[in-house]
Image: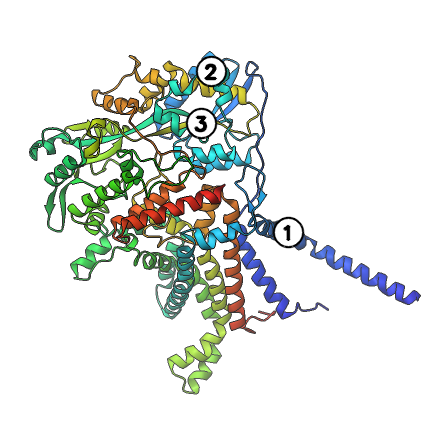
Amino acid sequence: MATTHTLRAKHRRSALRTLAFLSPWLIGFAVFFAYPMISTVYFSFMHYDGFKPPTWSGTKNWTYVFEHYPFFWPALRNTLWLVVIMVTLRVLFGLGIGMLITKIKTGTGVFRTLFYLPYLAPPVAATMAFAFLLNPGTGPVNSILEKIGIPAPGWFNDPNWSKPALTLMFLWGVGDLMVIFMAALLDVPKEQYEAAELDGASAWQRFRFVTLPNISPIIMFAVVTGVIAAMQCYTQPLIAGKVASGVIQGAGTMFEPGYPEHSTLTLPQLVYNLGFQRFDYGSACVVALVLFALSMAFTALLMRRRGGLIQAGD
Amino acid sequence: MPTRIPVVVRKAAFALTASTALLLSTTACTGQSATGSDDDASKETTLTFWHAWSAPNEVKAVKSLIAGFEKTHPNIHVNVIGNMTDDKINQALRAGGTKAPDVISSFTTSNVGKFCSSGALVDLNPFFKKADIDPSTTFPKAMNEYTQFDGNRCAVPLLGDAYGLYYNKTAFEKAGITTPPKTWSEFEADAKKLTITQGNTFKQLGFMPNYHGWETTTEHYLGQFSPTYFDTAGKSTIATDPAVASAFTLQKKLVDDLGGFKKLETFRSTLGDEWGPKHPFQTGQVAMQLDGEWRLGMALEAKPGFEIGVAPLPVPDDQAAQYGKGYITGTIAGIAATSKKQNAAWELVKYMTTDTDAVVAFSNAIHNVPSTLAALKSPDLKYDARFKTFLDIAANPNSTTAPASINGGVYLTTVQQLGYDYESGKVTDLKAGLKKAAAQIDTDIAQAK
């Protein structure tokens, strides 16, 4: 009996010690993750304008967002478009540039700086610059395209071209990925390439069977962080739409984001619009939860697809 | 020996952390309710006043307005903070606290319904009653309307904006037009006469009718048609009120007659912005412009190479008798529900909005339309003779505004969205489009209740 007691006490002490060591994370998790998440779920079922005390509204906010709020589905489609197309292109482009630069013998520093610099441009300034460059009437891009006889697109003024224009801008700022890929590519053991060459592997085979397996955890990292960044995409589409539409928030006017034809609308813009402009916090929480569910789903899907790729030791 | 966290738990924790980080960055759902106050306005106190003006001459004008108040109320000091956007004001009204404003002013009249229904700003009716001031005989009709919602007067007009027509007199002479158009049919004909094409684009456009850019918004056009927007039960009337369909049809006709939406949008993207010196009216690229009274000062400052004419905007042919009316909006002031110094705050609001000398001096300095009937008639008002057109529009009883609604300007953006879709050709059946928009407005209002 005495031994059991001692053992139990030992276990309890050990559990308490573990908890004590874990407490900074646990407190952080409770305050910054668990509490906001639970309150977001709670408020999604409440009618709350931020002033009067919240009242129970059942599934009214959910029905409103999914069935009656005209911007939800276009924003969801746009966000998914950015997640799938823009992230894929950014990873491919970042990897491509990274590979090119690691292969260059002279002037690497210059090229690295040149490709990294755009990443440092503040989002608003970068968007304004792109809106100027891609202006369908006066922009230099369209003037050149017209001169060489290529039909000039409407870019940020055309719903079919606004997202490709945004993607172009994000590709221009691919410097962050380029640096990460460069580091990963330079880390690939040289012997493996030599062995592959001795076995007669072609350039493609060397990339496929040596480079790719070595850098795949980094690709995974780039994709997951890219997906989260794409889902949070807020500033650039908002500014692009605002500049292109010519609507300036003046006396008595209210700007709804998404110009042209909802094509630059994203889910975070809806959270802002519903919560902070319409004072409808309940519906804003619904959209925030949709974003949460989507990011969970994407992350889980990616982890599953690349199961075993990232080990605890990585 | 350290134990490895099981794979499933590790993956779940990673996914959860990543997703929660995203959720955290996009939401914050907390707040507090409003409180009243029984402060003594005759005691020493300091108020915080937030406003949206930012240009140096405007900031100077606000300072001198406040200096005038402090002179008459030596016990009340005012801490003035400018360049505040509506979003910042909304947040401060919600959060309250010692640094939050006691008095706010905003450029966006369409937020009044939201401010009143949510209780963010206090109802000023009891204050007006106590001071023996009747708002309906103090303020012009339209301004009196847009500062209250459902009987709750949570805002007061603090200078107004009236919309009229600016025209290039020199271009008019060249085109053989002697007087500004009074009806929309005259306007259509003049817009065509004033348009000079150049290749695929325009050398001079008579008028830029597109809803994007500058002040050509749906509600500003609609103002000339006197729409009702809502019936007595609060339901949207945009599908049943013929004024709305007429305004949409007119704008679409202007767009089509001048070369179509795409051509006009491409031309529009080559033009300067609203607040810069290269505004297309100021550069002579557009001969007629729907704009507010502030444009006159800005246009004169840009020293255009032509003479500027000012007139009221045209009216529908069957309302020719109402020529002279216009759309009215403006700045509003209110007292934060979270303020603990509401009686002192009322003294400031009362001075800024009802003291004729203060209103006139502020109007002279800012070049906006005065917001009281007494100030509109004041001999102390200094202005360019052309500015008188806007004073007359503001005082005209037929002038209109967009009524306050429980969810602010959401109904206006729904109407505006239909405008975009109709002018671009995305919506071709106007009747069906208006019906759908009306249903959307009703649903949005039900959601806000």
The N terminus of chain B - image quarter: bottom right
Name, please, the residue furthest toward the bottom.
A199
Instruction: Give the spatial CA distance, label 1 vs label 3.
Output: 43 Å
Kindly identify which residue carries mark 1.
A28
Q: Are marks 1 and 3 on the same chain?
A: no
Position of residue A124 relative to residue B62, above or below, is: below
Which x, y percent locates residue A247?
31, 42
Position of residue A140 relative to residue B187, above or below, is: below
Q: Nearer the viewer, residue B185 or A287?
A: B185
Which x, y percent locates residue B341?
55, 22
Three-letter code, disc 1: Gly
Label 2 sits on a secondary structure element that is helix
Q: Which picture quadrant has residue B112?
A: top left
Which x, y percent locates residue B262?
21, 51
The chain to which mark 3 is attached is B
Label 1 sits on a secondary structure element that is helix
Kindly identify which residue carries mark 3.
B155
Q: Residues within 10 Å of mark 2 (few under 14, many from 20)?
A: some
Instruction: Give the spatial CA distance, label 3 vs label 2.
Output: 22 Å
Three-letter code, disc 3: Ala
Q: Nearer the viewer, residue B322 or B58?
A: B322
Kindly identify which residue carries mark 2.
B70
The chain to which mark 1 is attached is A
Q: Is residue B298 left or right of residue B108?
A: left
Q: Residue at x 46, y 70 (%)?
A: A186
Residue B85 visible in the current orientation: no
Label 1 or label 3, whichever lies nearer to me, is 3
Three-letter code, disc 2: Glu
Q: Nearer the viewer, residue B234 or A97?
A: B234
Q: Residues within 10 Å of mark 1 (few under 14, many from 20)?
A: few
